[in-house]
Amino acid sequence: MAGVARAGGDGGGSSNELQWCFSQVKGAIDEDVAEADIISTVEFNYSGDLLATGDKGGRVVIFQREQESKTRPLSRGEYNVYSTFQSHEPEFDYLKSLEIEEKINKIRWLPQQNAAHFLLSTNDKTIKLWKISERDKRAEGYNLKDEDGRLRDPVRIKELRVPTLKPMDLMVEASPRRIFANAHTYHINSISVNSDYATYLSADDLRINLWHLEITNRSFNIVDIKPANMEELTEVITAAEFHPQQCNVFVYSSSKGTIRLCDMRSSALCDRHSKFFEEPEDPSSRSFFSEIISSISDVKFSHNGRYMMTRDYLSVKVWDLNMENRPVETYQVHEYLRSKLCSLYENDCIFDKFECCWNGLDSTIMTGSYNNFFRMFDRNTRRDTTLEASRESSKSRAILKPRKVCTGGKRKKDEISVDSLDFNKKILHTAWHPTENFIAVAATNNLYLFQDKIN
Amino acid sequence: MGEEEGVHQTQLLDTMFVRGLKRKCFDGEEDVEGTLAGIKAIPSYNLQRQSLLDMSLVKLQLCHMLVEPNLCRSVLIANTVRQIQEEMTQDGTWQMISTQSTGQTSLDRLVSTDILCRSSREQAEGKHVPGYGTLSKDFEGDEGQDSSETMSTASSVQAPRNLQGNVWEMENPQENKGNFQKSLDQIFETLENKSPNSVEDLFSEVDNSYYDLDTMLTGMMSNTKMGHCDGLETFSSPTNTASNSNCKSDLNELDHIVEILVES
């Protein structure tokens, strides 16, 4: 799989197959998983030095990459906790008698413009802009107060001095700078920062709003698919994202497996799309579950802005933005589940929302599955890999062994049969470092970090 | 999978649905079983489809119990129900079930009120049966002529028509969350729109005194059981009854009574 150029690689005869090895795991080891600790979103920042996670308890944990040490020059920097804060609290909507969950649905970083870091975090109803800043100096030698903070009697001050800055232990502070509230009737599923770095969109089941980062008391509604009569509702918005370069373009996906690309220059209300992406259905495989499994759970533009990727229940599809009638590539994530759809409907697993991500070069895509398996697809070689995030293979630098699911007939050694899969161990959230072969995989309450093997 | 006798029904459904089998008429039943030869004791396609419909309707009802239902999930389930409904209409099986239910009108009325009362008792016991109260409210609100028909069982075909209106309107403050007090409010509101006859019909099986606030408060103060509607003891909170415009007692009198209760 393509990635960072490797010293000594000849790209010709020898295998370019990338091997992944374990780097770190974050989170409790207990079998008993506290609901609040379940990770609900994972996101690298633009440089990859910071990795943020959000959980069901409304907390955000940010990991920072340590600088590479001189004693171990070949080892990549470790990620250690940089900041932890409570982003959202549970709320109660008295008008509807409903609880508003504090679960963090999405985190999106803003590009760094000064010493501080900014990110947007959202739950079902409210988006918050957080500033994370470091403090490693403090002022000493105040005139009006003692070192321990007690006020000095002004009468007794005989001479003035200038306070000096002295170093202190590093303190990382997170403070909410903006709160964008009361703009969504339905549950927010996506936020996306625009390439102008001044605006962002937030999408719920039926509407998409455009915000300016500086203005919290106003947002523009740019998409509204709510029918006049709610009884006619048959389709909802499932994800939305801004184009990485064109600040007037965004896409949103639906529960019917369609993607609409909208241009904000054409009209203020983007109810009419510029492009409509839908793959015609294969009539021979139609079943009562066809629509449910076609529902798109995630949509992501490629870094170069030429493609977008969608994730539905059984597959990942890559679309060329210039071709609306079908995807250019389709990858089966776990086709062996097609014969189990009724069971998966009964236990609600069929409604699980898997995410997907691109690597920095847009040559490989990754998405999660069940049994703590996650899958990678190399778009150039068309080779795919299944790996597992498990404590058993969590020895330092241990190479991950590819896994295989046995779909029928004789089960080979090391294969796992479909009926043995643990559907409670689902990998919904994964993230790929923007420039390196380094990935973060969220397995329930644990965060696994893997890196490519260095020869 | 599916080779053993007595396999779980959903496993059999899996086998069936993997092919997306669709049948145009009843006669195809042998064909279906022929194709799936080798699997013993497989229920008919109709039975499996009905099972899927039942499962879907139960899932939609469960939505009412959740804190805030996932709209995407609800929409997808409702669309599945509609698909089944359309296919059953084409099959002709839909009409069959429709005609059956109209003959059970009086039974439905009985059941509906029984459910109302049962939900209050289960309320007292800590259980929730919220869906029925809400759904019957929607029926009565939306369908003038059909007001007497309510969804007595999960497989009633009348349910899907009004499910959407029910499921989506979570912003409607009247949606109940399994609270008997609220479903009772809804019933009263519905009754406001009804002709006197249907009101009497609806409650013909139940002693009207249960809904008489005075009676309830009297019963509460004297600590007597109210028959099979024990849960009504919890009904007489000031805010709830104040919002109930059909309540017979005078508000001032109510305040006075509650004041006495609170002080004692």
Image (cartoon, helix red, strand yellow):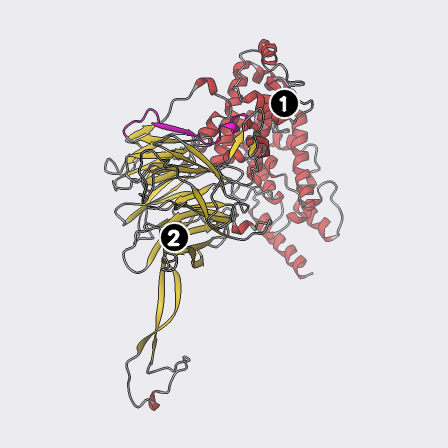
Q: Secondary structure at mark 2?
A: loop
For residue A15, what is the image quadrant? top left
> In this orientation, does residue B118 appear?
yes
Q: Percent position (x, y) of residue A39? A: 48, 48
Q: Chain of mark 2?
A: A
Q: Amino acid at mark 2?
A: Arg
Determine the CA span between mark 1 and mark 2. 50 Å
Camera-nearest label, 1 or 2 = 2
**Residue B2: image tag:** 1
Q: Which residues are magenta?
A: A322-339
Q: Percent position (x, y) of residue A56? A: 50, 49
Q: Residues within 10 Å of mark 2 (few under 14, many from 20)?
A: some
**Residue B115: image tag:** none
> In this orientation, does residue B166 appear?
no
Q: Nearer the viewer, residue A371 or B247?
A: A371
Q: Are marks 1 and 2 on the same chain?
A: no
Q: Percent position (x, y) of residue B164? A: 50, 31
Q: Nearer the viewer, residue B142 or B27?
A: B27
Q: Residue at x 54, y 38 (%)?
A: A371
Residue B102, above or below A403 = above
Q: Quadrant of the C terminus of chain A?
A: top left
Q: Amino acid at mark 1?
A: Gly
Q: Residue at x 36, y 57 (%)?
A: A68
Residue under label 2, please give it.
Answer: A76
Q: Nearer the viewer, residue B123 or A34?
A: A34
Q: Percent position (x, y) of residue A262? A: 29, 35
